Amino acid sequence: MTVKEYDKIIGARLKSARYKHSKNVAKEAIRLAKKYGADPEKAEIAGLLHDITKEAEPQEHMDVIQRAEIELTEMEQSSPKLWHAISGSAYIQVELDVTDREIIDAVRYHTTGRANMTLLDKVIFVADFISADRDYDGVDKMRKVADKGLDAAVLEGMAFTIADLAQRKITIAPDTVAGYNEIAFQKSKQKNK
């Protein structure tokens, strides 16, 4: 499929604000991909598709996850906010025949991050945090960090997520903790050299 075809599909599936957000993430993903050496075309596609099931009903999430033969952990089952990333990666495989593992994983981990993130994973994770439509407290700082270094921006985004979830006493995805620890550990090793 072409970018235009993917654009048409998300335009039909998403409300106006979410569609605009997806377009903004794709645009930011292209910019970050060019800056940090990822594939801009894959970044655009993953950015467009990252929220493709964000507005789906709970049963649609579960149906497409099951069709893709993905088994949810107990924590994932009890965390509906994580479903769209998992079902989105399933949907693009099952319904759109996307076979590129990098794109599939970038969609899958755009919310939680993970240890051993690929360059594309990082680009989409950060682009979602700093797209033009974002206006949360701290977004300007996050944008500045993203312009200095991709790993620093991923770490900043994970720290933001962990602090927010901990403050609200909500479960934190193990993938987020693992990704945070990996990057924080690498950063501390570099400081101690």
Image (spheres, grey):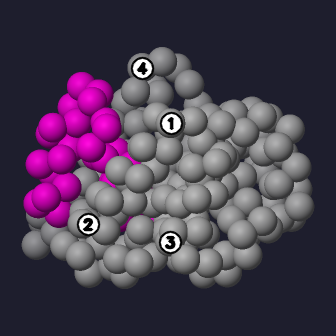
Q: For the residues marked 2 and 1, what is the alpha-carbon distance in whole angstroms?
A: 24 Å
Tag 1: residue type?
Ser
**Helix, strand, or loop for circle 2?**
helix
Q: For the residues marked 2 and 3, what is the alpha-carbon distance in whole angstroms?
A: 18 Å
Q: In which quarter of the image is the C terminus?
A: bottom left
Q: In front here: 135 or 82?
A: 135
Tag 3: residue type?
Val
**Helix, strand, or loop for circle 3?**
helix
Instruction: Give the residue at mark 1.
Output: 16
Q: Residue 167 carries which label?
A: 4
Q: Which residue is drawn at 29% across and 72% down?
A: 33
How many residues crowd mark 2 within 10 Å: few (<14), some (14–19), many (20+)? many
- Look at the magenta stretch and give its main secondary structure: helix
Q: Is residue 165 left or right of residue 127?
A: right
Question: In terms of sequence position, does the residue under pointer 2 or pointer 1 come before the other?
Answer: 1
Query: Is residue 168 rendered magenta in the image?
Result: no
Q: Residue at x 42, y 20 (%)?
A: 167
**Helix, strand, or loop for circle 1?**
helix
Q: Where is residue 140 in the image (x, y as percent from the top left)?
A: 15, 37
Question: In terms of sequence position, does the residue under pointer 1 or pointer 4 come before the other?
Answer: 1
Question: In terms of sequence position, does the residue under pointer 2 or pointer 3 come before the other?
Answer: 3
How many residues crowd mark 1 within 10 Å: few (<14), some (14–19), many (20+)? few
Tag 4: residue type?
Gln
Question: In terms of sequence position, does the residue under pointer 3 or pointer 4 come before the other?
Answer: 3
**Helix, strand, or loop for circle 4?**
helix
Q: Where is residue 99 in the image (x, y as percent from the top left)?
A: 67, 81
Q: In this view, does 130 lie above or below 30?
A: above
Front of the two marks 2 and 3: 3
Q: Residue 32 carries which label?
A: 2
Instruction: Give the residue at mark 3.
Output: 3
